[in-house]
Image (tube, helix red, strand yellow):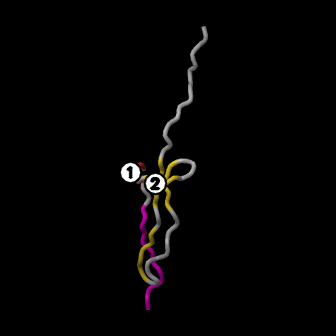
């Protein structure tokens, strides 16, 4: 008798992950403002954009941050 295989390959769906784009320009030319960036949920080798619900909301990177430029005169 031949022994059955102890391992076999299986196809699991690929995990979706967050991808954050570069920060945009500061919203002001002087003083305190904010910057925005695109955050997308992507999946697979071809980086297909999928619904945000497919990614873990708890690990989503922020899409806004404060920025400070020299004060206005």
Q: Quadrant of the C terminus?
A: bottom left
In depth, the one of 26 and 69 nearer the eye is: 26
Give whichever of discs 2 and 1 has the lower sequence position.
Answer: 2
Query: Image quadrant of residue 72?
Result: bottom left
* Point 52% across, 35% down: residue: 11
Query: Image quadrant of residue 35?
Result: bottom left
The location of residue 38, given as percent across then percent down, is 46, 64
Query: Compared to 49, does 22 lie above or below?
Result: below
Query: Image quadrant of residue 4?
Result: top right
The location of residue 33, given as percent across then percent down, is 41, 77
* Point 42% across, 62% down: residue: 62
> Judging from the image, what secondary structure is the residue with disc 1 in?
helix
User: Is 41 contained in the magenta span?
Assistant: no
The location of residue 51, given as percent across then percent down, is 41, 53
Contact between marks 2 and 1 (CB within 8 A): the answer is yes
The location of residue 46, given as percent across then percent down, is 57, 51
The residue sitting at the right extreme is 2
Q: Quadrant of the N terminus?
A: top right
User: Is 66 contained in the magenta span?
Assistant: yes
Q: Which residue is mark 1?
A: 53
Residue 41, label in figure: 2
Q: Is residue 73 left or right of residue 4?
A: left
Q: Which residues are magenta?
A: 62-73
In depth, the one of 48 and 16 nearer the eye is: 48
């Amino acid at each position: 008798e031949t022994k059955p295989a102890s391992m076999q390959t299986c196809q699991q769906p690929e995990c979706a992950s967050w991808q954050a784009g570069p920060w945009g320009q500061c919203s002001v030319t002087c003083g305190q403002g904010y910057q925005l960036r695109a955050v997308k949920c992507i999946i697979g080798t071809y980086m297909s954009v999928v619904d945000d619900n497919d990614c873990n909301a708890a690990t989503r990177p922020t899409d806004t941050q404060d920025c400070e430029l020299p004060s206005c005169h």
